Amino acid sequence: MPKLIAGFLCLLVLIAPQAIARELTDAPEAEIIGFSPDGRYFAYEQYAWDIVSDAVYSAVFVIDRETNELVPDFPIGMIPEEVEGRFPGLVGGFDPDPALIDTGDGTPDLLGLRKAVRDEAKVRLDALEIGLGGRRIAGVPITQRGPAETPSNPLIFALSPTLPSAIPDGQYSYTIEAKPDAEPADCVNAALPARTKKIGFDVIASSSYPELKDVGRQATSYTWALPEGACAAGIWIADIFAPPAQPESGESVVVLFLAAMWAPGADGAEWHALFVNLPKAKAE
């Protein structure tokens, strides 16, 4: 599992009001499950075995493009947070075999737990017809250590493949950047109350012919809750996916990102996904 990288801006969405993040040493893993054929729903799994909290967990998440929120009855599985006095927390009605989460012998059955979560989620995923992979069109994996990419560099991508030739590229390129509200001064010592905070995923559309120029801009706003005493610690946009179909209302992509936070006695990280709208740009 990759080590957390400190110093970025972060995003943490609380799954339930009583959830409390716990200390982690490594970032969790994420695996893409897929889209529905109409591109409305996007599903992924988060999983890990963390040696500090001595816990294994796995959960399936589904995001609805219409609302940019979790679909009802998701997530399902186990999350690295305390829910109703239990850690890891059980969500979505999941009730695992105790043998799957026993870490007493130092060899928990993470693969078995993941299979149990997938099996439990299958009926719900099938009801949404989720399974198509979509296309990964940009990103910097959290495991990548070279070339020298940093999370502060905006990602630039196009929706469709282009030819590496002298022929001018006729499609738009898009630059995406996360722009959160600033954290309070000396956040770590401020003893802040529970709060909400917004982040804008700002997208600029550019045309390269007959000259390079920006032709459109749009931001998708995302709101998250930070628990009492928590501070933003980091975010890494790892992947951008194009859905298998787009609505008539406008094109969008899915951004998958790792977010970290700090609170007294707890460093944590989770994967999140978001549908980000693309500008309806028209060349002059």
Image: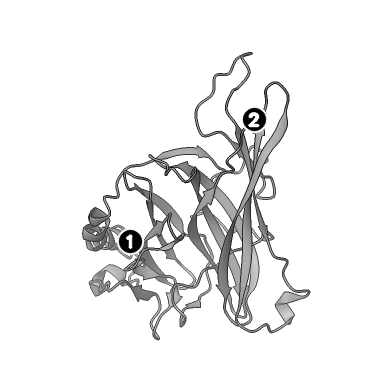
- Residue 199: x percent and y percent? 63, 61
Which three-letter amino acid code belongs to the residue tagged 2? Ala
Label 2 packing within 10 angstroms: few (<14), some (14-19), many (20+):
few
Residue 142 appears in the picture as rendered? no
Q: Residue at x 34, y 45 (%)?
A: 38
Which three-letter amino acid code belongs to the residue tagged 1? Leu
Q: Residue at x 27, y 68 (%)?
A: 100
How many marks overall? 2
Secondary structure under tag 1 reads helix
Q: Is residue 124 left or right of residue 60?
A: left
Label number found at residue 80 = none
Q: Is residue 44 left or right of residue 13?
A: left
Q: Is residue 93 above or below residue 248?
A: below
Residue at the extreme top of the image, as rendered:
166
Q: Residue at x 50, y 30 (%)?
A: 160
Quarter of the figure with the C terminus: top right
Give the foreground label among 1 and 2: 2
Residue 89 appears in the picture as rendered? yes
* Camera-nearest residue between 150 and 99: 150
Q: Are marks 1 and 2 in contact (CB under 8 Å)?
A: no
* Camera-nearest residue between 35 and 188: 35
Residue at the extreme right of the image, as rendered:
185
* Camera-nearest residue between 282 and 278: 282
- Residue 13: x percent and y percent? 51, 69
Label 1 packing within 10 angstroms: few (<14), some (14-19), many (20+):
many
Label number found at residue 110 = 1
The earlier-in-sequence mark between 1 and 2 is 1
Residue under pointer 2? 283
Q: Residue at x 44, y 77 (%)?
A: 16
- Alpha-carbon span between mark 1 and mark 2: 51 Å
Q: Is residue 14 above or below residue 209?
A: below
Q: Quadrant of residue 243?
A: top left
